[in-house]
Image: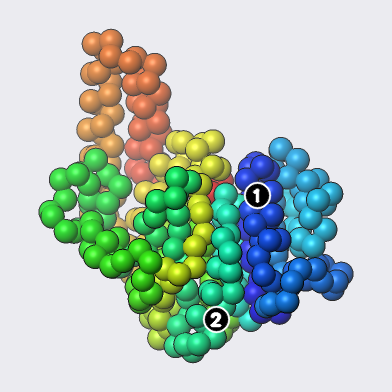
Amino acid sequence: MDLSIIIVSWNVAPLLAACLDSIAAAPVVRVAPDGSTAGSSGPRVEVIVVDSASQDGSADMIRARYPWVHLLAERENIGFTRGNNLGLARAQGRHLMLLNPDTVVHGDALNRLIDALDARPEIGIVGPRVLNTDGTTQSTRRRFPTLATAFFESTWLQGYAPRGWIERYTVADMPDDGTFEVDWVQGCALVARRAVYEQIGGLDPGYIMFSEELDWCRRARDAGWRVLYLGEAAITHHGGKSTEQVETSKHIYFQESKIRYFRKFHGRPAAWALRLFLLLSYGAQLILEALKALVGHKRDLRRARVATYWRVIGALATGRWARPITH
């Protein structure tokens, strides 16, 4: 088996169908659970879908329309990280792909990703060029974050970051269609060599979602592997279609995962400094939204934000995580 594609899905049946249709149209040979094959000549590919207790008929749709998919239908929502680890444990491929369900594979992108790993044995992980729904490039390649970066990235201070800080972090100084090494690539679409998985293990289950691929790439780099961005392979990612169903939990997981990463790789003082900053930041935003609600400016919106920020502050203060979700 050349490639195992692992897709963790939750309540996005139409998008999942489009993703699977795009894989079916790719120039690869699909290997079904019973060993039968379909598709044109090319690399042998298996697709493993971990359905995280969807309520929209996703599992039944796969059974009826995609018999070549290896379906792992869970009885509860097990989260993105645990779901991918289940798929990784089941996978037979010499290369292992994490792919979000709200993606569309274009042309021979899968072949190009496989070829890139086969051509350069020092590369352990490769990520494609990721496109937004409108065809523009989605920023998915990264350098490792510093603590200073963490204070600005995805917070209300991002617009005030010193010139070039965020651009350097997001590797905006390199061409979107280029091929070059980076520190890490985002997990909506990435391929890892099996040897990497065997050496460093799967995703850290301490991350429910967000930063799990950053952690994985960091561990791979620390083990001596390199990470490649491949601009000639394109995949569209519609983005956040599961997480937008649970907005508050998304805030909590994003920030707690960021703190976990810094605790693991930069130490407890850095993690506590980041936690304190985030508490103050969300507290300031809560007060601002409450004042706007009092003066009558978009009260329903302001009240919803106050409720969200209050829950986030509670989670940050106590370290309590909300119910697992996937993205």
Mark 1 element type: helix
Mark 2 = which residue? 115
Is residue 212 visible in the rendered structure shown here?
no
Q: Amino acid at mark 1?
A: Ala
| Residue drawn where x is 42% and y is 43% of the image | 252
Is residue 224 visible in the rendered structure shown here?
yes
Labelled disc at residue 18: 1
Is 269 placed left or right of 119 in the picture? left
Distance of label 1 from label 2 (alpha carbons): 25 Å
| Residue drawn where x is 56% and y is 60% of the image | 106
Is 269 placed left or right of 102 in the picture? left
Given contact means CB atoms under 8 Å apart, are the residues at marks 1 and 2 in contact?
no
Residue 244 image point, x, y percent: 50, 38
Pick the front one: 232 or 201: 232
Residue 196 image point, x, y percent: 52, 81
Residue 211, placed above or below residue 201: above
Residue 299 image point, x, y percent: 34, 14
Mark 2 element type: helix
Q: Callout 2 environment at 10 Å: few (<14), some (14 to 19), or many (20+)?
A: few
Residue 273, placed above or below residue 213: above
Residue 67 image point, x, y percent: 82, 58
Q: Quadrant of the N terminus?
A: bottom right
Is 22 placed left or right of 103 in the picture? right
State the image quarter where residue 248 is shown: top left
Pick the front one: 204 or 58: 58
| Residue drawn where x is 48% and y is 46% of the image | 133
| Residue drawn where x is 23% and y is 25% of the image | 288
Q: Amino acid at mark 2?
A: Asp
The residue sitting at the top extreme is 296
